[in-house]
Amino acid sequence: MEANVGGFDRTARLMLGSLLVVFGVGALADILSLGTVVGAVALVIGLVFLATGMTRLCLLYQVVGVDTCRRR
């Protein structure tokens, strides 16, 4: 599979993903009073954003036909 997540998109995914993971863990550990469901959803979405940012591959982008990765 070919990379389809480019520069700004990748940076935004990594930053937002990290933030969501922190909020999710905080909510699940009862440090933040966001609720268990909100914490779990934030954690899962954050992990997906981190994974797609690190691998530079988004399956949803591939299905829809979006490519933000500059080549050459």
Image (cartoon, rainbow, N blue to C red):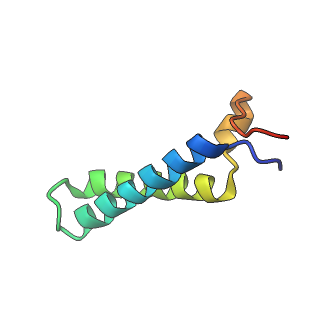
**Image location (x, y in percent) of residue 15:** 45, 53
Q: Residue furthest front?
A: 72
**Above/below status of 70 relative to 46:** above
Residue drawn at (73%, 42%) of the image: 4
Q: Nearer the viewer, residue 8 or 43?
A: 8
Q: Position of residue 67 (x, y in %)?
A: 72, 34
Residue 36 in the image: above or below residue 60? below
Q: Is residue 25 found left or right of 13 in the rendered image?
A: left
> Residue 21 sits in which quadrant?
bottom left
Q: Position of residue 64 (x, y in %)?
A: 70, 28
Looking at the image, is 21 positioned above or below residue 42? below
Snapshot quadrant of residue 65: top right
Q: Residue furthest bottom?
A: 29
Q: Is residue 9 left or right of residue 71?
A: left
Q: Residue at x 65, y 38 (%)?
A: 60
- Please name whichever residue, 50 or 27, is drawn nearer the observer in this view of the structure: 50
Please give the count of numbered marks on the rendered protein.
Answer: 0
Q: What's the residue at 43%, 50% (across, down)?
A: 16
The quadrant the C terminus occupies is top right
Task: Examine the rendered structure and indicate whether residue 30 appears above or below residue 59.
Answer: below
